[in-house]
Image (cartoon, rainbow, N blue to C red):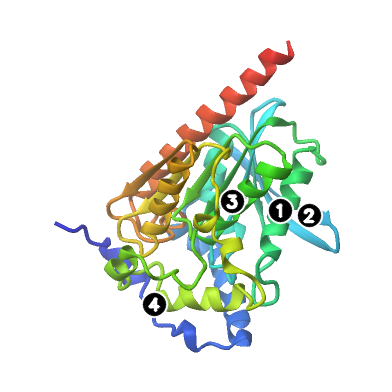
Amino acid sequence: MTAKVPLRARIVLRDKVDWEALTEEQVIAARGKVNRLRASRAMRIITGRPDRGARIEEHAIDLPGRRLRLRVHRPEDAGPGLPLVLSFHGGGFIVGTPAQNDWLNSHLAAHCPAVVVSVEYRLAPEHPLPEPVDDGYETLARLVEDPFGWGIDPAAVAVLGESAGGTLAALVALRARKDGPPLHAQVLCYPSTDWTDTMADYPSVAANSGNPGLSVSEWLTARRLSVPPTLDPRSVSPVKFDSLADLPPALVVTGALDPGDDHGRRYVDRLRADGTDARVTCHPTAIHGFLSMPGLIPDARPARAEILAFLRGRLHSASSTTGARER
């Protein structure tokens, strides 16, 4: 018997927007409203309350030609030598704000423990791909140098992302494979791994296209606005890369009721085929974006526990191994 989307999610997340009909200007206008709502205290009934064991700070980082905002989660009681987790929010590269991931990121910061930094990368249509990837990678390269004095251990670094942020996390890991810094883990939550014209040609899209969380029209609009005609979409589609060898171990979290479920599954298949340690966990009543809406989707809590255990095991063991070698 096929699981059903929880009733409260079906009621709250009714999608009545014809995303494909929106102009670029209308998308930009809608983004401001959506992001203000997602970041509001009132929305925490859906997005979840931050963990009290972590403090949240706003910082800015200067990169060539631009300044990006960072939302930083740090444990209240922890010494130096903390792992770094670089986090990327979802939103199809056209909407989204780091604050929508406070429930997950603050919990990871407090209980891993780690410094969890969410990047407010630039968004389309003003800044299409690959500009968000540049933002993610260049931020990573700067933060491992610990410019703010947070006590980051450069030998224990991971990337984390949901939806389009999962695309970014995977692409940053692929770039770091060649150019460094070394990564020890990647967590991809319901990632979009195919931004080519076959994006919607997966069984899970047909099976789950009527479920809330992600409409196919929104997904296709995101592709239209974020993948310019001059860009080869395979270059931003992790599942289409020729080789996925020599990447950090991956945990891919998906939802059985998500149109994008097969994007994550296919990516894990490719990672394993190329010798990369990877596993997928699929949650039976989870829709797209469920880790940003724990107030609606109960599966968010066990998924968060899996992510925490995975990062703890990979990052703290990496730090211990490096310390032992140095001694």
Element type at mark 4 = loop
Q: CA distance from mark 4 to mark 2?
A: 34 Å
Q: Amino acid at mark 3?
A: Ala
- Which mark is first along the chain, 3 or 1? 1
Question: Where does label 2 land, which residue?
Answer: 60
Q: Earlier in the sequence, mark 3 or mark 2?
A: 2
- How many labels were placed on the picture? 4
Lateral position of residue 149 relative to residue 46, left or right = right
Residue at the disc numbered 4 = 15
Would you say the residues marked 4 and 3 are in contact, meaning their CB atoms lie under 8 Å apart? no
Left or right: residue 22 versus residue 210 is: right
Image location of residue 142, percent across then percent down? 79, 45
Q: For the residues marked 4 and 3, what is the alpha-carbon distance in whole angstroms?
A: 27 Å
Residue 221 screen position, x and y as percent: 51, 78
Distance (Cα) linking label 1 and label 2: 6 Å
Q: Residue furthest top?
A: 327
Label 1 sits on what residue type?
Answer: Leu
Q: Disc 1 marks which residue? A: 70
The answer, for residue 19, to whether it is visible in the render is: yes
Say above or below: 181 vs 38.
Answer: above
Residue on which the image places disc 3 = 169
- From the viewer's side, name the closer residue of 51 and 104: 104
